[in-house]
Image (cartoon, rainbow, N blue to C red):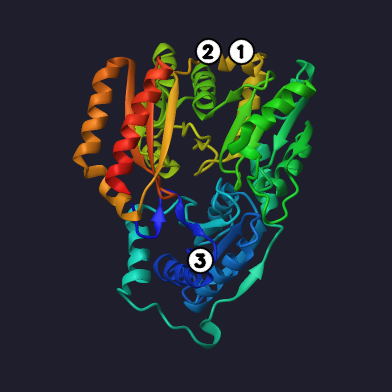
Amino acid sequence: MGRLFGTDGARGVANTELTAELAMKIGRAFGAVTAAPKREQPDALPQVLIGMDTRASSPMLAAAMAAGLNSVGVNATLVGVVPTPAVAYLVPHGGFCAGAMVSASHNPCEYNGIKLFNVQGCKLPDALEERIEALILDETEPPPVRIGGQVGRTEMDTAAVAAYLDHLCATVSYGLARDLAAQGRRRIALDCANGSASATAPELFRRLGFHFDLLSAAPDGVNINENCGSTHVERLGGYVREHGLDVGFAFDGDADRLLAVDENGAVVDGDKIIAICAKQWKAEGRLRESAAVVTVMSNLGFHAFCEKNGIATECTAVGDRYVLERMTEKGYGIGGEQSGHIIFSDYASTGDGQLTALQLLEVLRKTGRPLSALAGEIETFPQVMVNCRVSQLGKLRCAGDPEIQAAVARAEAELGKGGRALVRVSGTEPLIRVMLEGRDEARIQALANEIAEVVKVRLL
């Protein structure tokens, strides 16, 4: 766990924890570390792309980030409100040397964050983030001072996102909407979480010819994720059921994750979406190494389904960056998280909610089956989560605390092979998450509460 960067960038309450001053420092350090001039154009200033979500604080932080980059001789291109995966796509395909996204993802509006991407459009490895932290917090080396014509410039390019939408359209078959309509599945719902998807999802699905109902697509700077989107997917489920729609898609604030609901309003989480797509890809001979990558949070039911269908699974730490690292290392094509960060490495270098929705719709088209039938093949073991608010020092002490380890061992001994216990540090909030899984929901809830009490006593 870094001092500034968690599992998904730097994050905190905007203007108190993540200030404009800190954003500027991150820009300076990021520019100094990653934005070296190209060899074939040694006199040209490097160019960094910056996107943002719809929070009131996002323009302030994006401008501060750009100012920091400019101060070390790096040009900044602001592309306005876009999904995080749009930044990841546009960096390598637009000739940028790096990228940044100002967003706190699924968190409430008062939070914000900065996610950093390298020239390949991938999130920075831990070692590079630690170097940036050292430049900011320890002042290990002074950033370069640029004057005159070597000072970077900032420009706006809100049209750049069109190339990203072109790319998404090209990942699915021509006539996808028409073919689904011919099968009797015409109408979908899109819950944009009053976030980044509000700027792109309507245009994307219009281009593809879908009939859709649009929810939570009127951002006002403070309503992002407010009783909507993937953190409140039950609202979308009720809407789909009441209006007789065929499927619903719920994005989070920066549209890098997706949860779906079937025609009955039941939630289809990331585990089930990965399982559905992996099974279809295997049947088509497209699932490289017949494997999928998930995190330690994935449900035991997912693993049982994969074993039954001849799909190998590998687990990583929580965070889509770690999923991508394993996928890249082993050459796998599908991976992601239960929370809805899903990576299709043939098309993207990060989780992409809109891409995931399209790939799921392709499976519906090819199988001719409703989403409820596909998702019903995957059993979901009862899973409970208890979040314990702790101090920052408590987060650092969690992994080595002997009493917490003993409490986990007692729970696992009682559960045996039919369950598991997991205690992990949140990468984005001051929380310790206690997760238990097993067939007896009442028992795992009781065991989770017992472990949580130990965590609270030991780490407050």
> Which numbered disc flags the more N-terminal residue, 1 or 3?
3
Specify the amino acid type for callout 2.
Glu
Specify the amino acid type for callout 1.
Ala
Q: Given this view, does label 1 or label 3 mark the residue nearer the observer?
A: 3
Q: Would you name the residue on which mark 3 appears?
A: 16
* Image height of 19 relative to 418, above or below: below
Q: Position of residue 178 (x, y in %)?
A: 78, 24
Calculate the distance from the C-alpha at mark 1 to the C-alpha at mark 3: 48 Å
Q: Position of residue 230 (x, y in %)?
A: 60, 37
Q: Choose between 71 and 23: the one closer to the eye.
A: 23
Q: Would you name the residue on which mark 1 appears?
A: 373
The answer to whether the residues at label 2 and label 3 have Cβ atoms under 8 Å apart is no
185 displayed left or right of 38: right
Calculate the distance from the C-alpha at mark 2 to the C-alpha at mark 1: 7 Å
Q: Would you name the residue on which mark 2 appears?
A: 377
Can I make out residue 175 in this image?
Answer: no
Q: Position of residue 309 (x, y in %)?
A: 44, 13
> Which numbered disc flags the more N-terminal residue, 2 or 3?
3
Calculate the distance from the C-alpha at mark 2 to the C-alpha at mark 3: 47 Å
Report helix, strand or loop for mark 3.
loop
The residue positioned 51% from the left and 57% from the top of the image is 113
Report helix, strand or loop for mark 2.
loop
The residue positioned 64% from the left and 25% from the top of the image is 261
